[in-house]
Image (tube, rainbow, N blue to C red):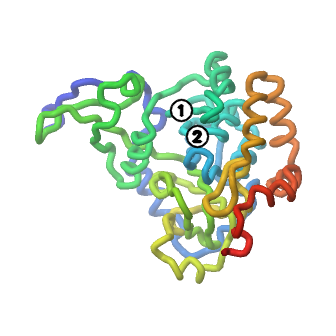
Amino acid sequence: MSQSSLKILDEGVGDLLTPIDLEAFRAHNRAKEKGLVDKRMSEKEAIRRLVHEGDYVGVELYGTVRCPMSLTRELIRVGYRSLRGVGQGVYESDLFAAADSFKAMDWTYIGLEVYGVSSNLRRAVESGYVENIVEWSNAALAWRFKAAAMGVPFLPTRSMLGTDTFRYSAAKVVACPFTSEPVCLLPALILDVGIIHVNRADKHGNCQIDGISGFAAEMACASRNVIISAEEIVDTEVIRRSPDRTIIPWYVVDAVVEAPFGSHPGEMSGLYERDEEHIRSYYESTKDAEKVKAYLDKWVYGVENHQAYLDLVGRERLEELRIRGARDGS
């Protein structure tokens, strides 16, 4: 069927924030190091080496589960001011908005879940600092990653049909060439950098996740560069004992950072609970821009690295959050 015979029935008014250049993406992936090399580095080295001003950046998580907070804080410390990216998180995206890190976002929802929506993002958008917001459903963004991972320019779905979310997206509705029914075409989403936190990884970048895996596999395979933080870096033999649990393979990963309690104040399945007290206190501060600045000065800019952040939280508090039996593996 010719291109002209595929009838476009409707299209959203949003912009494509990053081009769908699949051939360039393939060429980049072909050139990546495929050997089992040691990719361990610090947060500072990984962020400064792989993230550049203007990049399209994605942070993978599920609510506050597996939130890559050690990498988020380092990214903010660098002081980027014109990143583009995916806003579908909770705490980390709220911090990005508070720090004026992003100029444009494909987003679903940013807020503090039961506590309310993001005052920081509202201020950033209403002030004009965030110049472009394009709306999607959570499923739509995950399928956009999947399309890029599959190497196809779009995926047909029924997601968002008949909604205002579609209206403010960059999706298109076409008549299906087989059934003539309307289907929504979701454009592939290729990221410059994907940032993902996992339970364990080896030094080469083979990664395993316990519990909810979210869209980690799709984002990793849709990103030109992938930065992994892990609760622990284990010997490759540990990974090989359960190969079916390796959700991200070494050949898509560019950096591996060891970050115990790397999701704090978020949680990790089987390891530690979410720090509700910290998040509640942070949310209260977001109502006042000056209090948010004080929070950033204390918890982000005021600590040199992740270790210093953990020292500030306090070992006693971290132990209180640890799930019983997590220390001894029982």
Report how far apart the C-alphas of labels 2 and 1 lie in the structure.
Answer: 7 Å
Tell me: residue 67, above or below residue 181.
below
Mark 2 Cα shell of 10 Å, populated few (<14), some (14-19), many (≥20): many
The quadrant in which the N terminus is found is top left
- Disc 1: which residue: 109
Circle 2 is placed at which residue position? 89
Image height check: is 196 above or below 102? below
Left or right: residue 159 versus residue 30 is left
Q: Is residue 26 left or right of residue 224?
A: left
Q: Residue at x 44, y 52 (%)?
A: 25
Q: Helix, strand, or loop for circle 2? A: loop
- Residue 62 placement (x, y as % from top left): 55, 48
- Depicted 105 relative to depicted 238: above or below: above
What type is the residue that disc 1 sits on? Tyr
Q: Where does the image place residue 121, in percent across and percent down from the top left? A: 64, 26
**Quarter-wise, where is residue 52 in the image?**
top right
